[in-house]
Amino acid sequence: MSITNINAGQAVVQIIGNDSKLKKVLNDAGAGIQGFAQKWTAIGARLQAAGQMMFAPFQEAIRVFADFDDQMRRVAAVSGASGKAFADLTAQAKALGASTAFTASQVAAGMSSLGMMGFSPKEISGAMESVMNLSRATSTELAEAASIAANQLRQSENNSRYCLGEINLSK
């Protein structure tokens, strides 16, 4: 038997009796609540892992789209393409990305390289097939092949039509 005093301001309450049953009930309740919290923490961790796995494919798709979008913005900036010309280059990059071994982002990087060398949107569009052939033939990245072709073209002061004939290795 224990005597417990609780001081609540001016009031003093004295409990006289056997409080061991009360202590056991409170300890059992505390252990039950702790077990409940641990189970829900584990469930939360599993749900978080499942959510991350379900979101992973979307995350990759968003990354690929963002990379392509960044590359095409670079193409617009370096080539001066806007409106219909930009829409045409974007459509061409998507089409070549879907129908060749290159991704649309790689095609856009090649277009960007040509634009940095002063190619107009029309010249970029006309050069892409041959630049892709050069890339495959030399086992270089598409952007690097575009830089090589553009440098060669600009050094020899020829137009892109002549460059296309020089680097078209598929004929």
Image (spheres, grey):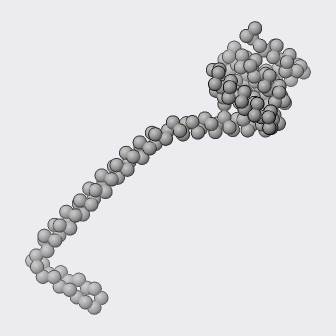
Image quarter in which the C terminus is found: top right
Question: At which x and y percent is residue 44?
Answer: 37, 50
- Identify the residue at image location x=86%, y=23%: 154
- Identify the residue at image location x=10%, y=76%: 18
- Identify the residue at image location x=64%, y=25%: 98
Q: Answer left or right for 110 relative to 122.
A: left
Q: Residue furthest front?
A: 84
How many badges with numbers are in the image? 0
Residue 70, relative to residue 119: is it above or below? Answer: below
Question: At which x and y percent is residue 32?
Answer: 23, 59
- Identify the residue at image location x=49%, y=41%: 55
Q: Nearer the viewer, residue 82 or 16?
A: 82
Image quarter in which the N terminus is found: bottom left
Residue 74, relative to residue 26: is it above or below? Answer: above
Residue 12 is drawn in which quadrant? bottom left
Q: Residue furthest top?
A: 171
